[in-house]
Structure formats: C-alpha cells, structure tokens
Image (cartoon, grey):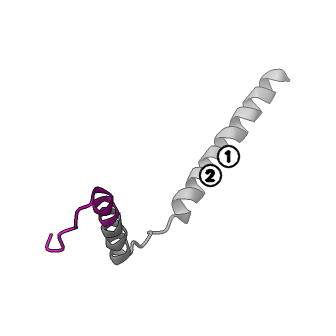
Amino acid sequence: MRKYGIWLVLFVCVAFLVGYSVTTVLGKEEAKVDREEVFTTIQKGYETQFSIRGKHLPMNK
C-alpha cells in the first residue's frame, strides 16, 4: 500500500504542474507597452541625474 501511495502523490504533483503550466501558457496575453510613457520615464530619470550633478540635459540628443 505504501508503494502505491508514493506513486499516487507523484502523479498528483505531476498533474498539478502540467495543469498549471498549461493554464499559464493559455492565459498569457500580450502586454501592450506605451512607448511614450516609457520614453517620458527615461527622460525624467536622465533629467534627475543631470540636476543632481548640476548639469543641463541637452535636448537635441
């Protein structure tokens, strides 16, 4: 009986992992990235770094 219990637990674990991975793959959606928001965030970061150093961010780059 003990041998069958171990196999049963192993089967349940494998079934759970397979089911979880399938639902994860099927449930994934393409994340839309707002490029303007990303650019604005990066620009604010650069402006903050330059202001800490006491320099100005060149706008033509």
Amino acid type shown at disc 2: Tyr
Q: Does the magenta stretch include residue 55?
A: yes
* Residue range highlighted in magenta: 46-61
Which of the numbered marks, if any, corresponds to residue 32?
none
Image location (x, y in percent) of residue 37: 38, 75
The reply, left or right, for residue 58 in relation to residue 27 is left
- Farthest front residue? 54
- Farthest right residue? 1
Image location (x, y in percent) of residue 9: 75, 34
Image location (x, y in percent) of residue 24: 56, 57
Q: Is mark 2 on a helix, strand or loop?
A: helix
In depth, the one of 46 and 22 nearer the eye is 46
Q: The C terminus is located in which quarter?
A: bottom left
Quote the CA–CA distance across marks 2 and 1.
Answer: 6 Å
Q: Does the residue at mark 2 contact the one at mark 1 (Cβ under 8 Å)?
A: yes
Residue at image point 70% right, 37% down: 11
Where is mark 2, residue-wise? Answer: 20
Q: In which quarter of the image is residue 17?
A: top right
The reply, left or right, for residue 58 in relation to residue 51 is left
Residue at image point 30% right, 66% down: 47
Where is mark 1, residue-wise? Answer: 16
Q: Reply above or below: 49 against 59.
A: above
Q: Reply above or below: 24 against 10.
A: below
Estimate how packed mark 1 is, as few (under 14), some (14 to 19) or many (20 or more) residues with alpha carbons within 10 Å. few
Amino acid type shown at disc 1: Phe
